[in-house]
Amino acid sequence: MDKCTTFYQRSKEHKKSGTVLLLRCNRAGRIKNTAKIRVRTTRKDNAYCSCFLTVEYRNDSTVAVKGCFGHAGHELDPALLRLSPEQHEYLKMLLEDMEE
């Protein structure tokens, strides 16, 4: 399994059987043209990528997951992953240790 994928929640649907989340690769999607200057460039490379996860949280406390981790239209790049605040602090600590 690749470790260079971050997902965003495309949709959330409530059904009788439970809640269904549709997660898509964060590198896919339409690039919104904004007039203001961005601090960083967008991570989106192309409109479509085949990588997805469909997660169903069922009322009977089970979880069903269907997905594809194959990517189309872009390369995998660990530098573009979204990191949690804890991961940022850990990387910062590692870099500071390297400077000493």
Image (cartoon, helix red, strand yellow):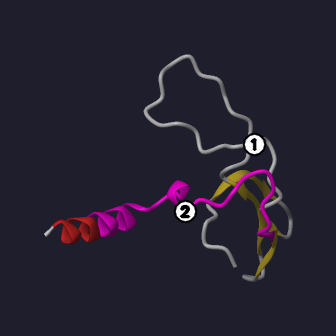
Q: Quadrant of residue 90?
A: bottom left
* Residue found at x 69% / y 57%: 75
Which percent across, then down, holds residue 53?
A: 77, 66
State the mark number for residue 78: 2
Q: Secondary structure at mark 2?
A: helix
Quickly name the residue at label 1. Answer: 46
Say whether residue 75 is magenta. Answer: yes
Q: How many marks?
A: 2
Which percent across, then down, holds residue 36?
A: 50, 19
Q: CA distance from mark 1 to mark 2?
A: 17 Å
The amino acid pointed to by label 2 is Pro
Question: In the figure, 97 relative to 92: above or below?
Answer: below
Q: Earlier in the sequence, mark 1 or mark 2?
A: 1
| 42 to the left or right of 59 | left
* Residue found at x 27% / y 71%: 94
Q: Quadrant of residue 84?
A: bottom left
Which percent across, then down, holds residue 33?
A: 65, 23
Which percent across, then down, holds residue 10?
A: 73, 50
Quadrant holding the C terminus: bottom left
| 98 to the left or right of 59 | left
Q: Quadrant of residue 70?
A: bottom right
Question: In the figure, 65 relative to 81: above or below?
Answer: below
* Residue found at x 48% / y 29%: 38
> Could you say which is closer to the camera, residue 3 or residue 85?
3
State the mark number for residue 19: none
Q: Secondary structure at mark 1?
A: loop
Residue numbers of the magenta segment: 68-92
> Could you say which is closer to the camera, residue 95 or residue 30?
95
Say whether residue 91 is magenta. Answer: yes
In the displayed image of the protein, which residue is found farthest to the right? Answer: 16
Question: In the figure, 1 relative to 86: above or below?
Answer: below
